[in-house]
Amino acid sequence: MCSIIGYSGKLISAAPLLVESLKKMEYRGYDSVGIATLNDGNILVSKGVGKVAEVDKEMDLNKLPGQIGIGHTRWATHGSVNDKNAHPHYSCSSNIAVVHNGIIENYQELKTELTRDGHTFKSQTDSEVIAHLLEKCYQESDSNVKETMMKTCQALKGSFAFVAIFENGIIAGARFDEPLIVGISDSALFLSSDVLGFLKYTDKSVFLDNGDIVIIDHNTYRIFDLNKRIVARPITQVAWELGSTEKGKYAHHTIKEIHEQSLTLLKPFQEFNDFQNFCEFIRDASNVYITGSGTSYNCGLLGKQLLSKFAKIKTEVIMSSEFQYYSDSLEPNSVVIAISQSGETADVLHSVKKAKENGAKILSIVNVPTSSLARMSDSILTLNCGPEIGVAATKSFMGQLMLIYKIVNILSSGQMPFDKFNQRNLLMMVKKVLNSDGIIQNLVSSLDTNIKDIYILGRSIHYPIALEGSLKIKELAYIHAEGIAAGELKHGPLALIDKESVVVVLNPTDETYQDVISSSNEIKSRGAYIIGISNKKNEVYDRFVELPDVDSYLYPILEIIPLQLMSYYLALKKQVDPDYPRNLAKSVTVK
């Protein structure tokens, strides 16, 4: 959530570059936007509520003059969604402006002190205290930006990445538990929360460590730690292609990324992934835990079942938001497998930090090999599926599944076959399921527009997919959806089923098939409308989505695709934007 961009250079004027960069990072989720530029010693701020293009059109953001500037998209945490709470925030004298990601836990205490000192606040945000604190320290240090940043960061408690622009033309940034990256080109320097903010101009990046402070003075940058020592951080060349951030022939990023699964399916198996090293950590562990949030948690649940069934390895899957309450009781020689698309999810990072403090080894499955999570890990596997712009995870979930299957294959010594033959065969089957796009679209068009409840049933390895499918429907279409273990129907959920209910059953012809048919008949007798996703048609289904025949353990990879497509077309039916669901963000960087 929330995006930061800072720019100092000679490429073009700052404002149009900042606006363009913020558009590249829209996938992170936000409700307001603003920029600040420096012109003739004056800091100019323009901001408002809405999408980048809307605010730019209304306020001519891109016409602010100046070669130096900062920009931000905000996702509200402190204070309502309005122009005053949008970033950037000024200091009292308007000689400093700030953009900030994260949460300042002691902002109320700081605000009280600063107000007592004569500072006047214009917003309800925690972020504004940074601007006023910088101003106070700037005055006390005789305009020394390094001293100002040091003192300010030492006073802040919580998580933050912030970038400040000063009247003297210096841009400074700091990070603590929030991502901040320096972009380096021949004629410009950038500060951003995401490499996509500057990837059009340079692929050379410096990933700041926790506690780093960076000062950009025109065409030079210096990095300090909180002890005022200059530190060197390596320059990394990032490799994501810009083309994958465009929609191409598709109406939305979400549908594009669903279809891209046929292109990204085998990407995790390229040479850079060291599966043997990753799996050795698991083999040597006395206890194995899996943690993740949302979609990644659902992937972990499937991983638990496959590891138990084929590799005879017992694992415990814990939501990252709950993990902190377990971490103190981790046994010696434990391994934690952390799954995160962005590698910047606050709950996951907090869990991993606590686990490391208690002596656990950290393995991570990520899409961004330079992310905070990856850099905290003892071994990583990367999805390599490129940028995922749609907020709801689709192709990244598929990538996570593929890595889990490969891990299980190795740890089971091939008891669950997943060699190149299986993978190529699976790729053909995925393409077949993606070709059912029109069937799903037609199915959704036949459903009542005012549908209020959708239930998805699955047993065994299909249950995590039921949870993931229901999550997608909630995220994209704002319809109450619930994934249910089919065997639990009589233990409560059956009370909810009536003729207004739509029930999707995940029912390939494996060991769960007949039991799910029995549950479907129970549901049918209550008048519910049943959609069957299976490789075998049955008269109990009102509508049928056909899956190709594959080995039974591979069906989860196929059956998620119809659920993703259904979620997308339900969103269109509800006339909501599937790329940017309300109240949600791609990278949840605050707890």
Image (spheres, rainbow, N blue to C red):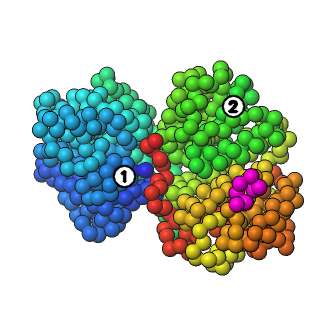
Q: Please identify the quarter of the rendering in which residue 219 is found.
A: top left
Residue type of the residue flagged with mark 1: Ala
* Residue drawn at point x = 59 percent, y = 68 percent: 452
* Residue drawn at point x = 42 percent, y = 58 percent: 26
Q: Please identify the quarter of the rendering in which residue 486 is found.
A: bottom right
Residue 329: % across, % down: 61, 24
The stretch of residues the image draws in magenta is 489-495
Q: Main secondary structure of the magenta part?
A: helix
Label 1 vs label 2, nearer the camera: 1
Residue 517: % across, % down: 84, 63
Residue for badge 2: 288
Residue 544: % across, % down: 77, 72
Residue 309: % across, % down: 82, 41
The answer to whether residue 431 shows anywhere in this view is: no
* Residue drawn at point x = 72 percent, y = 46 percent: 302
Q: 10 Å neighbourhood of mark 2: few (<14), some, or many (≥20)? A: many
Q: Secondary structure at mark 2?
A: strand
Whole-angstrom CA distance, mark 1 to mark 2, is: 36 Å
Residue for badge 1: 76
* Side of 97 relative to 55 (left or right): left
Count every numbered label the image shows and give the total: 2
